Amino acid sequence: MSFSPLLLQLINALRCLPGVGPKSAQRMALHLLERDRDNARQLAESLLLAVEKIGECEKCRTLSETPVCEICTDVNRDNSVVCVLESPVDLLAIEQSGGFGGVYFVLKGHLSPIDGVGPEDLGIPQLLERIDQGEVKELILATNPTVEGEATAHYISAQIEREDIRITRIAHGVPVGGELEFVDGGTLAHALAGRRVIVRDKA
């Protein structure tokens, strides 16, 4: 069976989504056209509206419908503590944990010379300019624990010349509720390297 040009175009367009291969894209396209045209129309309208109306925050680079996002304009946030992340998804994960009261800077990727991704593509000059303004006291490097993420964190820390800035890296180790026998060697190595002293009660 050969598909019509418009159907092929739809299938190929759906393949831009992460984790969607040819077969998955084909199933999605056929489902939308065969059984769910109302929702397909709503999906198309919502996607078009989002593309037109959602940009990025001028201060932290996360996705935002306004020039400056709600987090950056929140007066209850500690603007002296900035958490550097690779993507808006990471920001959402930290926000859902409820344990962070600072602000963010979203790189939207990591350094990858082989892919042509350099510091300017990640907004690193903008981050350094923000630090130079003097308000930032701590920079939390929360890039992913991959080779590229570690390299990006190292690069950023090497660019900061001010000595009054505290630079920290998020801990990587054994997950809460995890058992050591099921944890991979790399994670265990990070956990051991990042061990901390237990303060004992003297009473």
Image (tube, rainbow, N blue to C red):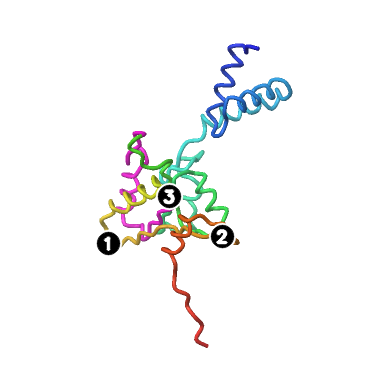
Relative image position of residue 103 (x, y in whole percent):
45, 53
The stretch in magenta equals 115-144
- Nearer to us of marks 1 and 2 is 2
Name the residue that disc number 2 marks: 181
Q: Residues within 10 Å of mark 1 (few under 14, many from 20)?
A: few
Q: Is residue 108 above or below residue 94?
A: above
Helix, strand or loop at mark 2: helix
Q: According to the image, label 3 marks what residue?
A: 143
- Position of 32 with respect to 127 (left or right) is right
Q: Are marks 1 and 2 in contact (CB under 8 Å)?
A: no
Which one is nearer the viewer's eye here, 116 or 94?
116
Q: Nearer the viewer, mark 1 or mark 3?
A: 3
The residue singled out by tag 1 in the image is 163
Which is more foreground, mark 2 or mark 3?
A: 2
Residue closest to the far bottom? 203
Determine the CA span between mark 1 and mark 3: 22 Å
Q: Earlier in the sequence, mark 1 or mark 3?
A: 3
> Mark 2 belongs to which amino acid?
Glu
Q: Does residue 127 appear left or right of residue 44 in this picture?
A: left
State how far apart marks 2 and 3 are (Cα). Answer: 26 Å
Identify the image quadrant of the N terminus: top right
- Residue 178: % across, % down: 58, 60
Q: Determine the residue positioned at 25% across, 56% down.
A: 161
Disc with the residue nearer the chain's start (2 vs 3)? 3
